[in-house]
Amino acid sequence: MLRRALRLGLGPGLLGRGLGTHRGGSTLDWDEKVSEIKKKIQSVLPGGAWNPLYDTSHLPPERADVVIVGGGVLGLSVAYWLKRLEKRRGAIRVLVVERDHTYSQASTVLSVGGIHQQFSLPENIRLSLFSVEFLRNINEYLAVVDDPPLDIRFNPSGYLFLASEEGAAVMESNVKVQRQEGAKVCLMSPEQLRKKFPWINTEGVALASYGLENEGWFDPWCLLQGLRRKVQSMGVLFCQGEVTRFVSSSNHLETASGEKMTLKRIHEVHVKVDHSQEYQPVECAIVVNAAGAWSGRVAELAGVGKGPPGTLHGTRLPVEPRKRYVYLWHCPQGPGLEAPLVTDPSGAYFRREGLGNNYVGSCSPAEEEEPDPGNLEVDHGFFQEKVWPHLARRVPAFETLKVQSAWAGYYDYNTFDQNGVVGPHPLVVNMYFATGFSGHGLQQAPAVGRAVAEMMLEGHFQTIDLSPFLFSRFYLGEKAWEYCVS
């Protein structure tokens, strides 16, 4: 029975059952009480307007209905959909806690900004189809009165995946699923490939798949800033700081089959504000873990994975930071303006950057060669040894490329199956996840945010069923594999 319940991951939405922190009363009631207290103090003090003894504008509020840990696109998307789907305007008080207000190390802004539907799992295809519709109509969703419209700079040049003889059958199977889900993808033989893209060397290529619509790349910074601007206009609160502790209560129970379980509920989040040794406690009803590469550490703070090995309580969130390099190079004789984002069977990829014969690209390292994630220093030797040979073999013009710059960013890498973790924790009942997408979280953020908000408000997924991405799969051993082309 427990295993069946874990697979479903369903139940009445926590927010749908009525707002309020554990001490009772809604946050709206609390605001009214604070206002009354201020008026009473003001009435007995000389002078005019309420004037606190010191500035507390940098501190988080004392209460919030939902605390979202992580202010990247996934966290902001959850905040957006919570406010958009709330039954009554202002009914849900949302606080976003982000430790890096500059986003200088955020995965979002260090991404190459690609979006495609060429996955093997139907859920991933649906997520990206939803998200591309959001991006292409972004001002219908994120417009703010009296602010200029957003220019996401969507470049619909498509993705081109190349497969070796060994990977051709997987590619054909993937494309069949993609078409069934409504993606516009075509298969190309080496001859067709040479005719359409004469700058490609097709040696070792048995088959290619090419996205005809709704694929390409966009400006990640624009999406991030657009979401942030919109949710602020909707009343979402922000705090620059780091979550250091969760205060929770426990409830021990026994299932019908005799299994003993301990359910936990978080009541308070401790936020350490920048340039201060003190923390600010925030009472809350729900916590959303959207902390990206650091979401595994945030989950540990809530006790996730701290039980005996092999038990649900001892099952950790398998998300960790993995460092990935991106290189920018100049090549006047390169593929040109019509080039899609190309992914080679070796794993190397590239796309055009702007209009000045510049390109960006890289590849992921082998598991045994993973770089130290403790810093964002770039290994330029990795390009020379692991990336450039594959690029030059596939595009002979890249023999003469000149690297102009490079940077590194983090993947929120799910070591279990490299797919996202969405929805509630089965034991920490008011912690929800939006993390672990291992490189495709940016492109799927609009859809994932809606899915998490639906689960919180209604108790189940509505727009896209993401049950295969629930946390419980780590305990059940049910991997949501993407069958990659090689």
Image: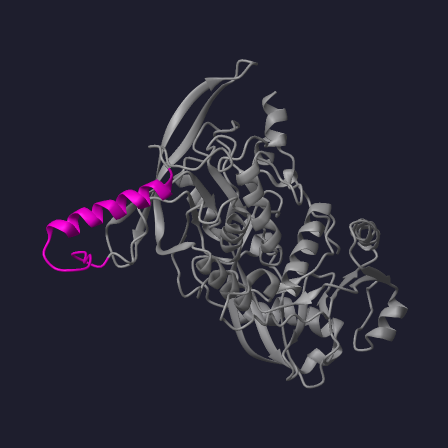
Please say whether residue 43 is one of the residues in the magenta stretch.
Answer: yes
Q: Residue pushed farthest front?
A: 43
Residue 340 lies in the magenta stretch: no
In the picture, measured across the screen, residue 22 lies left or right of residue 407, that is: left
Is residue 161 placed above or below 86 in the rendered structure?
below
Residue 399 location, quadrant: bottom right
Quadrant for the C terminus in the image? bottom right
Quadrant of the image occupied by residue 115 = bottom right
Is residue 411 in sight in this rendering?
yes
Q: Nearer the viewer, residue 216 or 400?
A: 216
Measured as percent of width and height from the top left, residue 404 is found at 56, 80
- Left or right for 247, reference 75: left
Residue 401 in percent (x, y) is at 65, 81
Q: Nearer the viewer, residue 337 or 84?
A: 84
Q: Main secondary structure of the magenta part?
A: helix
Residue 146 percent across, percent down from the top left: 49, 71
Q: Position of residue 228 (x, y in %)?
A: 47, 61
Q: Which residues are magenta?
A: 26-55
Q: Is residue 206 visible?
A: no
Question: Quick one: 129 or 16, which is closer to the camera?
Answer: 16
Q: How many marks?
A: 0
257 to 383, vertically: above or below: above
* Frontmost residue, 33 versus 104: 33
Q: Residue furthest left?
A: 46
Please identify the quadrant where the N terminus is shown.
top right
Q: How is the image coloured?
A: one colour
